[in-house]
Amino acid sequence: MRGDLLHRLGGTVGMAWLLAGCGISQTGGGRVPDLQSGVGSVAAFEKTVYPVVRDKCKSCHGQSQAPLFAVSNSTLGHDRAIEFVRFSEPATSRLAIYGGNSHCGINCSSTTESVIVEEIENWRDLAGEISQSDEDFDYVTPETVLPSLTGGKVTMNWPLDGFGYPGAMFTIEVEQFVDGVYRFGAPKLRAGPLAFAVADLRVLVNGSWDPGTVAYRDVEIHISANQVLTAISTQTMLVFGQDGPGMDKISIAFTRFDGGCASLPLFVSQVKPILANCRGCHDSGVAGYDLGAVRAFDFKGTDATLCFRSLRRSNPNNLSQSDLIQYPLLGTPMFTTPQINATQAESILQWLQAE
């Protein structure tokens, strides 16, 4: 049914995916319910596609050029790369096609394309052996049956007490887009007496998620204690149903849901002033910001949100090699002049160690 719907919807669905991609709409891809984003899929990615893109693509897509699938943090790289992969037909994956279209000089060739196709197949096969369910998500709400949508848009809500944050709640609006396709929008979060931070939101249908539904994967936000329902994204997202309203079960998954930064005062006093060097490009609230830089790392928001986003750009296995330090210290193809010095890099490292 999905293939017919994609053919019928054509550019509409393609455009929904294009907004999260880098230039070519990907239509006709099949749902991959047996490949979830989690430990299994990441481990497979690290053994297959990741070494290739780190070798061929990191000078741009490991620095500041979106999509950032070749960054030093393999989990973040995985979560970007999977947006541009078709496991049902690896040769038609945008990741492979772009690897062979010469857009990046000698690193992009037919040989590179063939290697990426082969490694996507290996990724799929290895991930299938390791992980085949949504259980890889650490934070998944209970399933709620999708109500009737004949009367128009409805709001679904999930209490988040089970995550250890009493009084917290997530809500999202849903409506029928066309037969077999739901449109989600206006996601909101509320906090009880405890503050929390979330990242990378997924909408699951009957326990599976579609790699094409990426609108809320850039969510990185800190919610203050007792904060009222607060919008966390203005985007809408099309999600394919399976059995229809009254039967499909919806749940919400987060790859991160915790208290956020443990050393916020140190971040504010020691790191935030250093990041001011980068605000002109990375802050969507500043006139003249760079869209690519904002998509990679947006500084707009509260101190707690900026701290949380900064922490997400650390490498827990080697803090000194964190993107938060290495990019501004060494420069990138987008800004060849270093933005911080060694003393400032050490200050950032001290904060990461405190976290």
Image: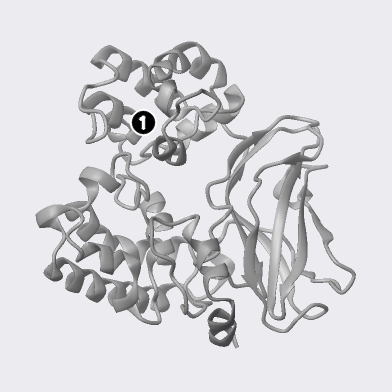
- Please, is residue 276 above or below residue 304 in the view? above
Indicate the quadrant where residue 240 lies.
bottom right
Give residue 319's position: percent from left, percent from top.
Answer: 33, 33
- Taking the image as shown, residue 267 lies to the left or right of residue 313, namely right
Give residue 181's position: percent from left, percent from top.
Answer: 67, 74
Per the image, label 1 sits on a secondary structure element best described as helix
Give residue 338's position: percent from left, percent from top.
Answer: 24, 21
Q: Amino acid at mark 1?
A: Leu
- Taking the image as shown, residue 310 lies to the left or right of residue 112, namely right
Which residue is located at x 69 percent, y 80 percent?
Answer: 180
- Please, is residue 181 above or below residue 4 in the view? above
Query: Relative to the observer, which residue lies in front, 241 or 289?
Result: 289
Query: Relative to the observer, which residue lies in front, 164 or 125?
Result: 125
- Taking the image as shown, residue 301 lies to the left or right of residue 144, namely left
- Taking the image as shown, residue 39 lies to the left or right of residue 342, namely right
Q: Which residue is mark 1?
A: 324
Which residue is located at x 60 percent, y 88 percent?
Answer: 1
